[in-house]
Image (spheres, helix red, strand yellow):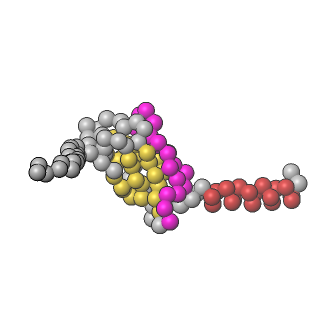
Amino acid sequence: MHPAVQRRLSCFLALAACAFGAEIRGVVLDPSRAAVAGAQVSAVGRVGVVAQTYSGPAGAFELRVPESNGLNLMVTKPGFATRTVPAAETEIQLEIAAQVDSVRVVGSAMDVPLSE
């Protein structure tokens, strides 16, 4: 391989390694330790969300991030409480969300003339 091509290739590989320097893997479980498929898993840093994916049928997920230092994982799924944990945590157990019932009462008024 020509030395100039080799230098460019090694530069490209070094930049690619910097762009996605860490891989975060884990599994999302429910309170009975069963897999939770379709949970949204977001890697959150100081500037916001840096990577996002969904857990697979076995609850497993994999995220590629520039760096895992200082990141948290935020996991959401309808029916479960949102959970935020350090990125080093590989097993994330979600709790069932509290059920909220509400009743909305709307009143109306009607003008009725007074009898004379």
Left or right, 10 with respect to 27, comes to right
Residue at image x 44%, y 48%? 41
Residue at image x 69%, y 60%? 15
Residue 13 in sight from this viewpoint: yes
Q: Nearer the viewer, residue 8 or 110?
A: 110
Q: Nearer the viewer, residue 14 or 28?
A: 28
Residue at image x 85%, y 55%? 5
- Residue 53 on the magenta segment: yes
Q: Nearer the viewer, residue 14 or 106?
A: 106
- Residue 55 on the magenta segment: yes
Magenta-colored span = 47-65
Place residue 38 in its image quadrant. top left
Residue 82 position, x and y percent, is: 33, 50
Residue 64 position, x and y percent, is: 55, 51
Residue at image x 39%, y 58%? 86
Return the residue found at the far top.
57
30 above or below 49? Answer: above
Residue 101 position, x and y percent, is: 21, 44
Return the residue found at the far right.
2
